[in-house]
Image: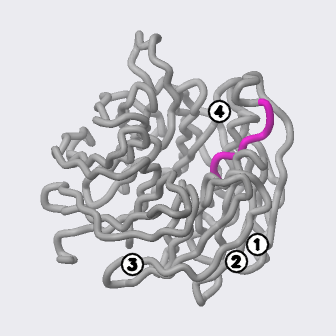
Amino acid sequence: MDERSEQLFYTGTYASRNERGIYVCALDIENGDLRMIGGVEGIERPSFLALHPDGSKLYAASETGEGELYAYQVDARTGELHLVDRKGTKGAHTCYVSVTADGRYVMATNYSGGNAAVFPAMEAGGLGDMSGQVQHTGSGIRQDRQDAAHPHSIIPDPSGQYALVCDLGLDRIVVYRLTEDGKLVAHREAVLPSGSGPRHLVFHPSRPYAFVANELNNTVAVFGYNERNGELALLQSLSTLPEGVIDVENTAADIRITACGRYVYVSNRGHDSIVLYHVDQVTGKLKTIEWVETFGGTPRNFNILSGYLVVANQDGNNIVSFAIHDEDGRLTRTGYVLEVPSPVCIEPTR
């Protein structure tokens, strides 16, 4: 690998335990070309991945009936993964994993189990015993998708004081105080319009705003965020679909913001597109700019790597790269496609 011209990334999939589940891939930062380097077997449905801030450890959510977290050591030169630990999450279908900015705690949500859990990140690469757990209860207005609580993500806030859980089943973002000993203490809630289905959340890198992808009503919500109080205030809601699109079954999926804080992207599964928004740096509000086809079905997840947006198309069985234009954030297809079975997560190395 030429470190000057390639960015490594990991791809999670819906593979069985006997198949390769996590792939090590590379993006050519000169032209957006993609290639596969290797990967690991032995984990079932590794649908979400998170790299430790020091880059030496990767955590994977195993989205099964008995949810688990896997911990891998990362080879600093090749990106190769070595399993060092696995822990049960005490809930079904672990669908999200994140790491606090200080690297002390690994957090996960169980979609069907309705709960969230916290584990200490051990220096040797493993996971300590579960330090905190919270259980959500209740339901929403959509009996097909909101029959119970469904925590879909847990995101540490920029201050490290709080963790925010997007609950698709309850139409709520629950803010927890993350204690020094790794426990979650209920703090506040932000309630979204009924049937929204909040899924994923990103913070602005330098301004007091948060942006949420709502899966069920295909919207992106803008919140003001008071970091000191851990408080969200809804400012705006916009569709993730073009006006007049009514004949496509769609669910919004992932959301990302560029490091400069000027561009927000959301993926649409069904419409099979990425929508670009410009961020007003004063008000935090979004302006819709364009939709770009993902050239593969069901873009469940995507990420931003070295000036490119890289999309995992779950039902297209491929990964597609787009160049991001600095001046306006618009996407241009590079023409490069990597064939991967059921890719559902893109996580870059440091």
Q: Is residue 103 left or right of residue 245?
A: right
**Could you tell me which secondary element the residue under label 2 belongs to?**
strand
Q: What is the C-alpha distance between the residues marked 1 and 4?
A: 27 Å
Q: What is the C-alpha distance between the residues marked 4 and 3?
A: 36 Å
**Could you tell me which secondary element the residue under label 4 belongs to?**
loop
Residue at mark 2: 120
Q: Are marks 4 and 3 in contact (CB under 8 Å)?
A: no
Q: What is the C-alpha distance between the residues marked 3 and 1?
A: 29 Å
Image coords of residue 231 (percent x, y) = 70, 47
Residue at mark 1: 182
Image coords of residue 20 (percent x, y) = 44, 63
Residue at mark 4: 197
Q: What is the C-alpha distance between the residues marked 1 and 2?
A: 7 Å
Looking at the picture, does residue 5 appear above or below residue 270? below
Residue at 63 percent of width and 82 percent of height: 126
Q: Are marks 1 and 2 in contact (CB under 8 Å)?
A: yes
Q: What is the C-alpha distance between the residues marked 4 and 2?
A: 29 Å
Residue at mark 3: 80
Residue at 20 percent of width and 44 percent of height: 327
- Residue type for callout 4: Gly
Q: Quadrant of the C terminus?
A: bottom left
Q: Residues within 10 Å of mark 4 (few under 14, many from 20)?
A: many
Image coords of residue 216 (percent x, y) = 60, 28
